[in-house]
Amino acid sequence: MYKEFYKPQNYVNRELSWIDFNGRVLEEATDTSNPLLERANFLGITQSNVDEFFMVRVASLHKLAAANVTTTDASGMTPEEQLTAVNKKEHEMVKERYEVYNKQIIPDLRQHQINIMHLADLDDRQKEFIRRYFSDELMPVLTPMADDTSRPFPFIANNSLNIAIQLRRDPKQKKAVQEQEILEGDQEVKSRQLEPHDDSRESDIKFATVRVPSIYKRLVRLPGENNFILIDEVIKRFLGQLFPGYQILASATYRVMRDMDLDVAEEDTSDLLRAVKHQLREREHGEVMRLEVENSIDEWLEDQLIDNLHVNERSIYRVNGPVDLTFLKKLSGMVDGHTDLRFPPFHAYQNPALDMEHNIFAAIRKHDYLMQHPYDSFQSVVNFIHQAALDPEVLAIKMTLYRVSGNSPIIKYLGMAAQRGKQVTVLVEVKARFDEQNNVRWAQRLEQMGCHVIYGLVGLKTHCKVALVIRRDEDGLRRYMHLGTGNYNDVTAHFYTDMGLLTCDQEIGMDMTNLFNMLSGFARPPYFNKIRVSPNGIRNFINQKIDQQIKIAESGNPALIRMKMNSLSDKQIIAHLYEAASKRVKIQLIIRGITCLRNDLPELHGNIEVHSIVGRFLEHSRIYYFEGNGNEEIYLSSADMMTRNLNRRVEELYPVEQADTKEKAISILDDMWKDNVKARVLVGDHYERIDNHGEEPFNSQEFFVQRANVESKQTKRQEKSKRHFSNVFETLSRHVPSLHLDSRKGERHE
């Protein structure tokens, strides 16, 4: 029945919804309740977000439009129509971003004596500093690239910062050269020198470009506290030194974003790793998706860029300020002092049972552990792998890796385990977008350390986040597992919110063995006991659960569906939720990003409410909850409700069943739903700030931070108290032998 909702007017375009999400991030840059340096960081994040969006999503639309594809998306738009709409909306967003930069961020920074200066602002000492900096540091590294008959227009790398230069030969220098040539008997020059020379002739004007070296920070620290200047301004000031004998007529910073989508024809290759390496080289020369230039750029220079980079008008972005605002993400780390302008630090809670001083496997045997990062320390997950590597009773470790950090301790411990003779199998997804090169490097490193490495699966991305440890316990072999909603990345775990479960549940263990056999071999398990696996498995499971809630509602009983995810774009799942709402099922959704669902259709009877939380941490956990007939079920997953996750990726969904962990998971979801500070509410096809109606403000992320701080302090006090008691007891035992004996008896009894 849900197919009755397959109408274009019932869906929001995915790409336009994403731009709206980036607008919510921009709102955080304008929110004065956020510390100033964090606001600058949010503005920088909007830039890096849109860069990736153009490199992948807009690039995909370009390819479809170029192939004259006229099929429509769920909202009824062709690729060409989407391109036009996306560029139109993004031009508006660019204007908003630079208004925030020029009218809010820069003036507010200046009030706190943090200055991003221009050449005209510099005093004599600072001018001398940049002269020396250019001469000593930059000049030897820079390479001017000319465009003339003997040197074609140079290749402009994706996301590189460049300076376009209009120049001509210095008339005085040119005349001197000609006179010298005449003296040396050059007849051609003799004939030309009789003609009057026009310095403004088009043929005398030349184009050149200089790439700003990425090995240097974009912000150059100047003399004086917290004074900075952009490196491209320094280079432009001294361009004349790169072109002796020429006059610099005009210069402007520019940047291009290219098609960087990896397109591996996996069905045609027997060597996936080699194919990925080849595509990494090929994509560097992808078509230009966007050209950013300073809005003060000389018209002649702009024409040269447009003609040589082959961009159309809608893809040209003229910005009122510095090209590429991602440097703002680095500003906080460069500013001295001003702790009040940053988010206050917090201490993630480290459960003592999961630290390296305790036996983690013994702890998991007793009960499951549910963790919510970054509030619960990700170090517990690292410790789990570390102990598995060291434990002589561990026989094997199996793990999937999608994105890891550049200096991953987990990689180190997996290698350590292999070198200690344990069987280590790691699936490294070498097609993980923008981590391909990093993952290829890690995959080869793991192989060198003795691990068995699988380079993903043909035709699918392996996006699940699972680890399986096989250990010989006193009562036989036992499987210990970690299942997560986010990546095994010790860096992003500090600012992505994710959830993970440590368990030795027997049925989940059997499922995990089947999953890894499927990933490493030809096994196709007929069924899974408790976990659900995409492709198809998670879609079928979610559909079954929605149908169950519909039946409960149709019987006259209350039914509730709650979901938290990054994105909701799958047409079929949305239509099924529409059907459930039309049958009086209450639906509550927390969606950080893309939201293709509308909640203003009259058939829904107001039964769908959608929130979007955008705050200090990037909401990344996926939670699926169903309540009806007095029964509550809650599941965690690596998958969003997107077609790619449900159809074209290996994903996992798993239940949280142990009474205390289940209660904790539900409580976390409840707290996030209560958020009325960083949450927005969907109104039809767009989000608005929640009107508190005089209610007490509740910021869920801040609530979790404060709770983590309290738990950390309590744990430290308890540990300190234990150490104090242990020291006292040890002192007494030296003087009272019977007490020492009793203590040993007690220890043996435990």
Image (cartoon, rainbow, N blue to C red):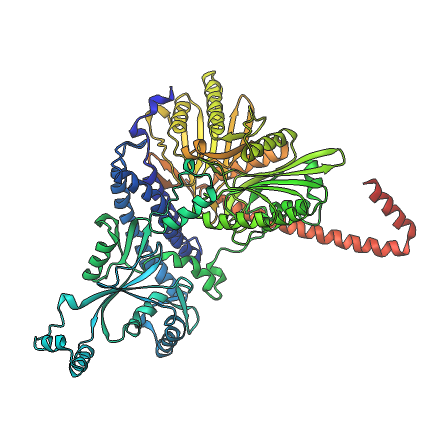
The quadrant the N terminus occupies is top left
**How far across and how far down the image is residue 454, in percent?**
54, 40
**How far across and how far down the image is residue 430, in percent?**
48, 44
Q: Is residue 242 left or right of residue 735?
A: left
**Residue 368 in view:** no
Q: Is residue 442 left or right of residue 330?
A: right
- Give the residue at x 84% y 57%: 731
| Viewer-side residue, 394 vs 221 | 394
**Residue 740 in view:** yes
- Give the residue at x 30% y 26%: 7
Quarter of the figure with residue 166: bottom left
| Viewer-side residue, 164 vs 265 | 265
Farthest left residue in view: 195
**How far across and how far down the image is residue 319, in percent?**
28, 56
Q: Is residue 419 left or right of residue 25?
A: right
| Viewer-side residue, 358 vs 65 | 65
- Give the residue at x 45% y 45%: 274
Q: Is the residue 665 above or below the residue 240 in the image?
A: above
Q: Is the residue 668 above or below the residue 155 in the image?
A: above
For the image shown, how many numbered marks are present on the structure? Answer: 0
